[in-house]
Structures are given as C-alpha cells and as structure tokens.
C-alpha cells in the first residue's frame, strides 16, 4: 500500500473515531438532561383550575421516559381526595421551557396544558365549560412531594 493511501485511511479512521466519541458524549449529555428533568417533574403536584369544582386537583407524575425524540411521563390526574386516574403526559422542551400536555380523564377529553415555572410550580390552562361554552380556565399546581 502506498504512503498516500495509508495516510488517507488513517485520516478517515481518525475522523470516524472523533465522530463516534462525540456521538457518545451527546448521548450521555442527553441522558443526564432527561434525568435532571425527571427529578423536577416526578412527584405530587396539587392545586387546580379556576372553576367551581377545580380547586382540589392532583397530578402525580410517576415516571419520565424517552421514546426516540419524544419525552413522556406517566402518572395520575384528578380529584386530590381520590388520587386521580391514569394519564399519559406528552413533554415538550423548547430552550428552557418545559410544557406538559395531557387529556383529563373523565372530563370529556378536556385538554390540559401546563408549563414548568421554576422547580415547584406548573401554570397553564384546562379546557372546560363555562355555562354552555368551552373556555380555557387558568390552572396552577404546586409540587408538594
């Protein structure tokens, strides 16, 4: 093998090694970021929506996982006295903003959208009826456990 061919093969091998190392470092960094987010979200959140019956709600985030590019959480949502019903939560991250979206069980499929504010507050909205029309009711939950 000539010296030029050997040098080119070594250059490609070096480039491939660098790419492999960088990819592994990004994967580790992504896992660490997911773990940090899970620590913030997992737990019991209490509060409610600005409705006649919405002041005593609970969101219990039991776990956070990644499926490809999508982060999801599983947990329970509903009346705090009954510990809620199972929900699947879609988690969206854009820069430092973290948004949780799910459908409230037993609420005619009413969507709930919450944004993580600091480490212990979720603020957002819940679609609900005001008389005969649908409105976005403000919602606030605070982490208690």
Image: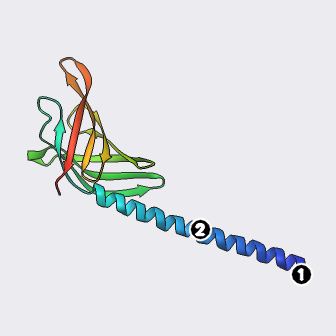
Find the residue positioned furthest to the right: 2
Image coordinates for residue 141, horizontal then vertical, percent: 21, 44
Q: Earlier in the sequence, mark 2 or mark 1?
A: 1
SS label for mark 1: helix
The image's colouring method is rainbow
Find the residue positioned furthest to the left: 81
In the image, 88 versus 142, the foreground residue is 142
For residue 37, the mark is: none
SS label for mark 2: helix
Q: Is residue 80 left or right of residue 3?
A: left
Above or below, comparing residue 21 to residue 38 in the picture: below
Image coordinates for residue 38, horizontal then vertical, percent: 33, 59
Residue at 48% from the left image edge and 55% from the top image edge: 68
For residue 22, the mark is: 2
Circle 2 packing at 10 Å, graded few (<14), some (14-19), many (20+), is few
User: What distance separates the C-alpha of mark 2 from that of mark 1?
Assistant: 29 Å
- Quadrant in which residue 133 is drawn: top left
For residue 3, the mark is: 1
Find the residue positioned furthest to the top: 132
Image coordinates for residue 57, horizontal then vertical, percent: 15, 42
């Amino acid at each position: 093998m000539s010296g030029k061919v050997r040098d080119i093969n070594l250059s490609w091998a070096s480039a491939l090694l660098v790419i492999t190392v960088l990819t592994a470092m990004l994967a580790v960094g992504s896992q660490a970021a997911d773990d940090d987010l899970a620590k913030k979200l997992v737990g019991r959140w209490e509060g409610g929506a600005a409705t006649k019956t919405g002041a005593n709600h609970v969101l219990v985030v039991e776990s956070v996982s990644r499926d490809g590019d999508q982060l999801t959480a599983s947990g329970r949502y509903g009346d705090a006295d009954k510990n809620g019903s199972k929900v699947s939560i879609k988690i969206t991250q854009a820069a430092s903003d973290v948004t949780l979206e799910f459908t409230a069980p037993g609420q005619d499929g009413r969507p709930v959208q919450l944004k993580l504010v600091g480490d212990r507050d979720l603020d957002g909205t819940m679609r609900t009826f005001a008389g005969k029309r649908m409105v976005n009711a403000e919602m606030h939950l605070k982490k208690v456990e």
